Image (spheres, rainbow, N blue to C red):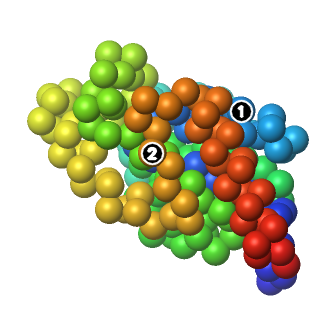
Amino acid sequence: MNKIPLREQSIVLIGFMGVGKTTIGQVVAQKLYRDFIDIDEEIERRFQMPPKEIFAQYGEATFRRYEKEIISEICHKRLKVISLGGGAFLQKEVRDICLATTTIFFLDLSWDSWKDRISLLMDSRPVLQGKNMEEIKQLFDDRQPIYGQHHSRVLTDNQQVEEVADYIVDSLKLAWELYAD
């Protein structure tokens, strides 16, 4: 398989649910003149039902299988900006595909900053349904080491969307200059 040149690799944003992967990803895509793909929206489009309904009707395992297939396909495309769902990166196959074919940015938000957003997230995130704060904190903590497998980490506490997007774009441009294929 031909290796995709660094400059043409798709960019993948990972991080816990609600950190801003979609919002920031859209801005990064615009700044780099690339197409933006939100994996959850792509799943919804292809299966004509939101992730929450797929979870409820078919279970998490079926959702994760669809998710993995779609991510595998899209990561091999060039010049995309891709937002992964918060749980997608937990699958080893997804991590391996992303690490091998794309440039991964981990959007890191502290627990204290994240929990301020929880009221906005509760209804739309199937993984949070029926969990108390202690259980959600455990989920948050358990996922942090997995998100540690990335190419670049961006601290997003107290940062505006535009600032984070500019940081990512500047980092990419520097890497492209330093490591030109």
Tell me residue 180's x, y (percent).
83, 74
Q: What residue type is labelled 2?
A: Leu
Q: Callout 1: helix, strand or loop?
A: helix
Tell me residue 71's x, y (percent).
63, 56
Residue under circle 1? Answer: 27
Residue sitting farthest toward the bottom:
1
Tell me residue 173's x, y (percent).
77, 57
23 or 110, which is in the foreground? Answer: 110
Give yes or no for contact between labels 2 and 1 (Cβ–Cβ under 8 Å). Answer: no
Residue density around tag 1, few if under 14, some if 14–19, many if 20 or more, within 10 Å? many
What number is the disc on residue 99?
A: none
Tag in front: 2 or 1:
2
* Quarter location, residue 43: top right
Q: In this view, does 177 lie to the left or right of 72?
A: right
Q: Can residue 84 be seen from the camera position used here?
A: yes
Residue density around tag 2, few if under 14, some if 14–19, many if 20 or more, within 10 Å? few
Q: What residue type is labelled 1?
A: Val
